[in-house]
Image (cartoon, grey):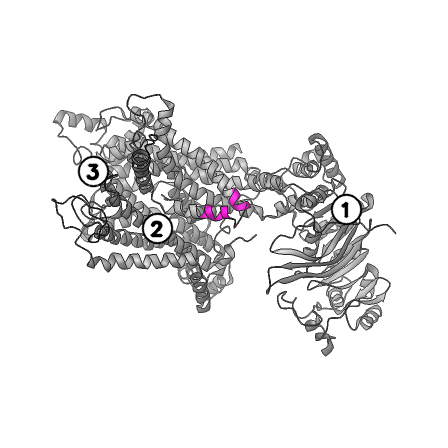
Amino acid sequence: MSVPALEVDGLRVEFGRLPTAVQAVQRVTFSVATGETVAIVGESGSGKSVTGLAVMGLVDPPGRITEGDVRLAGKVLTGSTESEYRRVRGKDLAMVFQDPLSSLNPVRRVGDQIAEAARVHGASRASARARAIEMLERVGVVPAARRARAYPHELSGGMRQRVMLAMALVNRPQVLIADEPTTALDVTTQSQILELLGELQREMGLALVLVSHDLGVVAGIADRVLVMYAGRIVEEGPAAEVFAAAGHPYTRGLLASVPRVDDARPVLAAIPGSPPDPTALPSGCPFHTRCVLAEEQCGERRPPLHLLTGGHRAACLFADEVSIGARSL
Amino acid sequence: MFGFVVRRLLTAIVVVLVATFVVFALVSARGSPVDRFSLRRIDPTTRQNLIEQYHLDKPFLEQYGLWLGDVVQGDWGESFRTQQPVGDMVRKATWNTLLLVGTALILSVVLALFIGVVSAVRQYSVFDHAATSFSYFGFSMPDFFFALLLQLFVIVVLHEQLGIDVLYVQGKYSVGQQGDVVNLIEHMVLPVAVLMLTSVAAWSRYQRDSMLEALHTDYVRTARAKGVPRRQVIRRHALRNSLIPFVTVVAIDAGILLGGVVVVESVFSWPGLGLLFYDALKASDYPVILAWMAVTTVFVVLFNLLADVLYAVLDPRIRTGGPYRRRKVPVS
Amino acid sequence: MSMRIGDEAGRARAEAIDPTLLVADPLRTPQDGSEWRASWHRFRHHLLAMVGLGFLVFMFLACFVGVHFAPDPFELNLLEPPSGPSGAHWFGTDVLSRDSLSRVLHGGQISLKVALGVAILSTVIGVVIGAFAGFYRGWLDALLMRFTDLWIALPALPFLAVAVSIGTVDLGPLGSLDLGGPLGITLLLSCLLWGSIARVVRGSTLALREREFVDAARAIGASNTRIITRHVIPNCMGPIIVNATLVVAEAILVESTLSFLGFGIQPPTPSWGNLLSDSIGNLEDQWWLTVFPGLAIFLTVLAVNFVGDGLRDAYDPRRRIRA
C-alpha cells in the first residue's frame, strides 16, 4: 500500500497558556490518500478549521501544536522551520479559504496574485503569467486574459472562489485543504464550485480535505467523513456508511437537522443547547449535556472510538444501537 | 477616474472661495487697517492712497470681490511694514520654508515608515516599546520648548563645554557664507529636527497600527498559504496596502506642518513663511496677513484634494466604481 | 483643527477612513453600573494611566492650592540679579527677581483652566455636529463631514492668532469680550478643536442608529432629538471621553504656543507659554527659566496622554491588537 498523501497523527493544538489554555484540537488522527476526499464536519468552534491551519503550519501564537505529527507523503512536516514550511505551502500542500473577497489582496489584479504563487516557487515571470492564465481557463474564469487583469472586487463571488482555486492549484499540489469553500456563496454557485472541485481532483489526482459545517455540501463529494465536536473526532468512516448509519448522536442530530425537500415534517429538527465553551468542557463525553440518550456514565468517562463496521467508528457508549437505529429509518 | 478628479477639483474651487471669504472676513474683523493699527502716523495723502488701493471705503462684499480680483491678477499689494510688494516677499519666504519643510517631510516619512513597520512586525519587542515611548514623548513635547532645549544644548553643551563648533541656532546662513551648502545644512539641522519631532511621533504610530491591521488580514494569510516568503509578505502585501491610508494621512497633515513652521521659524529666525507671518501679525501688516492666510488655506484645501486623488490612484476599489467608500482602509 | 497630530487625532482620521476601524466599539460602551466598574478596574491596572492621573492631581493641587503657600509671583526686586534654584526659590528667580515657582504655578492655573474649558465646550460642539451628521445621514452628513475634514486639517495656530488679534469684541448686552484673554482664547480654541470629536460621534451614531433600541424608542413616539440625546449619545460616552482627553492635551499645547509667540495671554499675567518666551533672551545664563515652565507643559501633557491611553483601554480592551 502506498504512502498516503497526507497523514495527521495524534494532533493537539493549544491556545493560550496554562492554566487557561484552550485545547482547540485534541488527538485528531486521520489520513488522506491520493485522489481521496475526506470531509471534516462540525459546528463553529469544533476545531475543524484549526486542524486545517495546523496542517499548513499557519497556527500563530498564542496557538501552537503541542503534540502529534503531520506527514506529507511520509515526510514529517510538524516541527519544520518557517522557511521549510513555506517551501511546501502552495507547492505540495495548498489551502483555500472561506471568504474569497477578504482572502484576496484587494489592490492587486487577480492574475498577478495567481502568478505570484507560481513565481515564489521558482517560475519565471513569463511562465508564471502563462500558467496563471491557463489555470484561469481551467477553472472556468473566461475570457482568461481579460479577467486576469481584474481586481477582486470586480468579480462575482463564484468567480473569486474559482480564482482562489486557480491560485492554490497552479503548482499542482498533492494535497488541497478547502476550508468552507462554498459557505460564502449562494446555492447554485455552490454546486458549480463543488463540481469544479471534483473535476480538478480527478484530473490532478488531488488528496482533498474538505472542511465544512454543511452536510449537504459534503454528501455529494466526500469519500470519508470525520465529524468533530469540541476539538475531538467523534465519528469517522466511509461517507455512505456515516450518512446511512450514523453511530454518534451528534451526527444523527446534524443529519436530522438538514432540511430536505422531500421531508413533510413542518418543524426543523435542531440539536438542543449550543456548542460547549472550550475553556469549560463538560466532563466525560463532551456531547452528553445535549444528548437525548445520555446516562450517568456518559458524564463520567470519555467514550473511545468504537468500531462499528470496517473503517466506521463512533465515540459513543451506545454507538451500535444508534447506528442500527439510523439504518432502520 | 477623470470625472472623479474633475468633480473633486470643482468642489475644491468652491471650498477655496468660501475659505478665502472667511479668511477675508476674519482679517477685516480686526478693523480697518488704516484706522486702528497704523504703526506710524500716516499723512492724509498716503492714507487716502492706501484706502483706494485696498478698497477700504467700499462695502464689505465689494471689498472682498475687488480683493479677489486683484489677487487673481497678481496684485497682492505692498507690505505696510516694509513697503515691498507682498508677492515678492511671499515668494522668497516660500522658497526658504520649502527648504525646511520639504526636508523635514521627506525625512519624517522615511523615518516614520521605518519605525512604524518595524514596530508592527516586531510587536512588543524592545524596539516597539522604545518607539512607543518616543511617540509619547513626541506628542507631549511642545515644539517651542523642544526648540529652546536644542538651542540650549547646542550652546551650552556643544559650544561651551565640548568646544564643538558645529550647528547653529539662528538664521539661515552665517554672515558672508551665502551659498555654502555645509553652512546651510548646519543651520538647518535644528529647525528640521524640531519640525520632524511631531510628524514622526504621530505618523510612526499611525503606520504601526495600520501595518498591524494589514498583517492580520485574510489576504496576508492567503499569501502565507501560497508559500510567499515572510519578507515578501510584509513588503508586497501588508506594507503596500498599509501605505494607502498612510499617504493620505501625510497629505492631510501637511496643514499641521504649516502651523509648526510659524513657531520653528520664529525661534530659529529662519526667513521663511512662518517668520513672515509672525512679523506681519506683530506689526498688523494687513496685506501680508491677508495674503498669508489665503495662501495657507488654499494650500490646505489643495492638499486635501491631493489626498483624495492619491487615494483613488492607489486603491482600485475607489477607481473602478465598486461600492464607493470614502477612503476605506483595505482590511478584510 | 489640529495643531498636534495626536494619536487620537490620527485615529479620528482613520475613523474618517472607516468608522469601525481602530476605535473603541461603541456597542461595547458601558451601559450599566457593573460595566462602569469593570472599566474603572481596567483603568486602575494601567500603570502609566494611574501615574498620569496621579501627576495631574498633584499638578492641580499645586496650582490651585499649593500656590497660596508660594511667594507672591508679582513681587519684584530690581536690585537683585536672577538666581538659580535654591532653598528659598525652588525654581529660581527671573530677571525681575520674581519667584519662578509661583509664576509657574499661577501660569498653570490659567493653562489648566483654559484646557478644561476647551475640552468641555469643544465636546459639546463636536457631539452636536457629529450626532446630527450620523443620525440624519444623507447630504447633511456628507456636507458636515467634508467641512469637518477640512476643519481638522487647517492649522489652528495661525487662525487663532489672527482671531485673537481682533482684540476686544463688543457683545452688546453681554458686555465685551477680550479675545486675547483666557475666556476669549477658550471660546476660540473650542471653535477650532471640535473636529475629532465630531468624527468619532458621527461614527458611533451611524452604528448605533441601526440598533433595536432606536426602533423601540421610535415605536413609542420619541422624537428624533430625544432619541439622539437620551439614547445615542450616552452610548458613545467612551469614545467621547477619550477624545475629549486628547483635546485637553491639544488645548494646553496650542494655548501655550500662542502665549509663547506673544499672541495669547499677555505678561505680566503668567502663562506657561509666555514664561518661556520671557526666557529666550537669557537662554544659556538662566536655564532654569526655560526648563521649569517647559517641563511643566511637557509633563502635564504627557500625563494627560497617559490617562487618555488608559481610558481607551478601559473602554475597549479588545482594541489591543494581539498577535
The magenta stretch spans residue B131:
yes
In screen coordinates, is B37 left or right of C16? left
Look at label 3 and name its amino acid.
Gly
Q: In front: A301, or C208?
A: A301
The residue pinned by badge 3 equals: B31
Name the disc covering residue B156, or none.
Answer: none
- Secondary structure mostly taken by the magenta-highlighted segment of the chain: helix
Q: Nearer the viewer, mark 2 or mark 1?
A: 2
Q: Nearer the viewer, mark 2 or mark 3?
A: 2
Q: Secondary structure at mark 2?
A: helix
The magenta stretch spans residue A28:
no
Q: Nearer the viewer, mark 3 or mark 1?
A: 1
Q: Which residues are magenta?
A: B117-132
* Contact check, label 3 and label 1, Cβ < 8 Å: no
- Between marks 2 and 1, how big is the CA–CA gap? 61 Å
Q: Secondary structure at mark 1?
A: helix
Asked if labels 3 and 1 share a chain, the reply is no
Name the disc covering residue A196, or none.
Answer: 1
Q: Position of residue C300 (x, y in %)?
A: 33, 52
- Name the chain letter of the residue that bears numbered label 3: B
- Whether residue A213 is visible here, answered yes or no, is no
Q: In front: A128, or A218?
A: A128
In screen coordinates, is B280 left or right of C49? left
Q: Position of residue B6 (x, y in %)?
A: 48, 33
Q: In front: C19, or C133?
A: C19
- Name the chain letter of the residue that bears numbered label 1: A
The residue pinned by badge 2 equals: C301
